[in-house]
Amino acid sequence: MTEYVLRFVAGGVIVTAFAILGDMLRPKSFGGLLGAAPSVALATLSIAVVQHGPRYAAAESWTMIYGAAGLACYSLAVCQLLMRFRLAALPATIIASVVWLAVAFALLAGFGGAAA
């Protein structure tokens, strides 16, 4: 239960800090971009360092990087499916989800030693 309270507090503080940063930047759309994923990742990594040590947190950060690379490829795939192939949003996102998973797991399999 203490871990969840710690995650809640740390996440809230970091989300607030990123929201303030996002509010100061132009265009305002950066606020939403900076509000969620980076703050949750930092809260998770800070808790991982406290509970499991820096080596564990380093391995966890690598898996976050692999997931982010997969997300970038997913985003490009969705754009191509929507713009070039004129697919509807739901089929495009479902198809591109396979790209996200494939890239993330391929990076994990290929560079898994960096995460260990």
Image: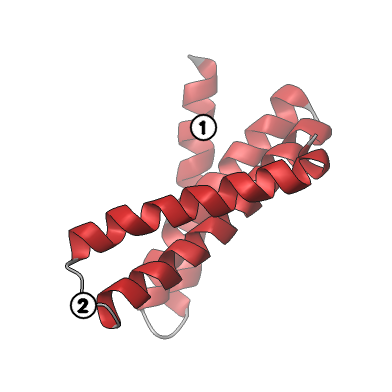
Q: Secondary structure at mark 1?
A: helix
Tell me residue 86's x, y (percent).
21, 77
Residue nearer the viewer, 99 or 1: 99
Please name the residue shown 36% across and 79% down the image: 28
Query: Which residue is the site of mark 2?
Result: 86
Amino acid identity at mark 2? Arg
In this view, the mark in front (2 or 1): 2
Foreground residue, 18 or 87?
Answer: 87
Label of residue 7 in the image: 1
**Element marked by disc 2:** loop
87 sits to left or right of 29: left
Q: Residues within 10 Å of mark 1 (few under 14, many from 20)?
A: some
- Give the residue displayed 65% in from the left and 44% down from the top: 63
Hey, what amino acid is under mark 1? Arg
At x 82%, y 44%, the residue is: 114
Q: Position of residue 89 (x, y in %)?
A: 20, 65
